[in-house]
Image (cartoon, rainbow, N blue to C red):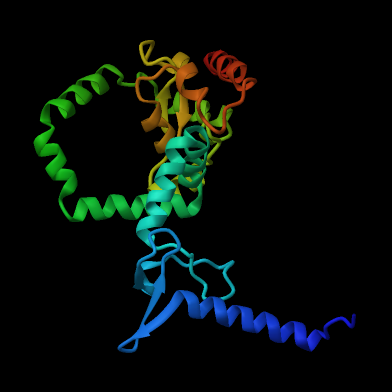
Amino acid sequence: MIGLTQEEKDRRAIQRKKDKYNKTHKTINEVEYKLCSICNDWQLTDMYYKNKSNNVVGLYPYCKSCAINKAHKWAINNRESSRIMKEKYAKSDKGRERNNIAWKKRTQNGSIKEYQRFNKEKIKFYQLKRKKKKHKISEVERDRCKSYFYYSCAYCRLSEIDHFKVNNQKLHLNHVDPSSANDLSNNVPACKSCNSSKGTNSLYSWYLNKSFYRLERYDYYSNGLMKIIK
């Protein structure tokens, strides 16, 4: 049996792509539609996410609605993997930029003020808790603390320079033990994200579930605090 020539192989490959395209695409009144591989509905091509690995049309085979439902089901069935992926994305430049845009959008459209108006008791409770956590640390002590941790978040290691680029503010100070002292013996530098997500959680319960969790860093926190105080 004589093998196919390269020219014939290329021709057949092109034909297969054309056949595949014709089965899942049609044009109505000069508007292009695509068949969703999940819901089997014909939808405008604008209703599909882009897919760089698809060298036929550059789109995913399923529509945006099905893609969202598919991702939601995966997240429910793979909670730990989903959490790690979300945290990794939130720490990325793209994730931080997107969160900042979303925050500015909520500020501009009034949704933040609306939340504050309908959740006054929650906000008051939070403010009272924050008052009890007032730091008793001088600027010199604050700088010494940051210096020990190389001017980076003690938890995720985000540098203060990068933190300022994203949040337009310096690193925060976070209570290692939420119910303990407000002085240098119980505070470490933390980025806005870590400081906010840790909240009133204990270091162990919060840090254990983080993607950047490292057992050896517990001693680092403890020893670091003692060295700074000395």
- Which residue: 13% across, 32% down? 119
Query: Can see residue 171?
Result: no
- Which residue: 57% across, 82% down? 18
- Measured as percent of width and height from the top left, residue 33 is found at 37, 77
Image quadrant in which you'd find residue 178: top left
Image quadrant in which you'd find residue 35: bottom left
Given residues 73 and 3, the one toward you in this image is 3
- Which residue: 44% across, 62% down? 62
Reply above or below: 160 against 52: above
Q: Is residue 103 left or right of residue 156?
A: left
- Measured as percent of width and height from the top left, residue 42 is found at 36, 71
- Measured as percent of width and height from the top left, residue 190 is found at 45, 31
Query: Can see residue 206?
Result: yes
Q: How many marks?
A: 0
The furthest residue to the right: 1
The furthest residue to the front: 1
Reply above or below: 34 against 71: below
Reply above or below: 22 against 187: below
Q: In this view, does 58 lie to the left or right of 170?
A: right
Question: Which quadrant: the N terminus?
Answer: bottom right
- Which residue: 41% across, 81% down? 26
Given residues 25 and 209, the one toward you in this image is 25
Image quadrant in which you'd find residue 121: top left
The furthest residue to the top: 180
Question: Which quadrant: the C terminus?
Answer: top right
Given residues 217 and 34, the one toward you in this image is 34
Given residues 178 and 40, the one toward you in this image is 40
- Measured as percent of width and height from the top left, residue 106 is found at 23, 51
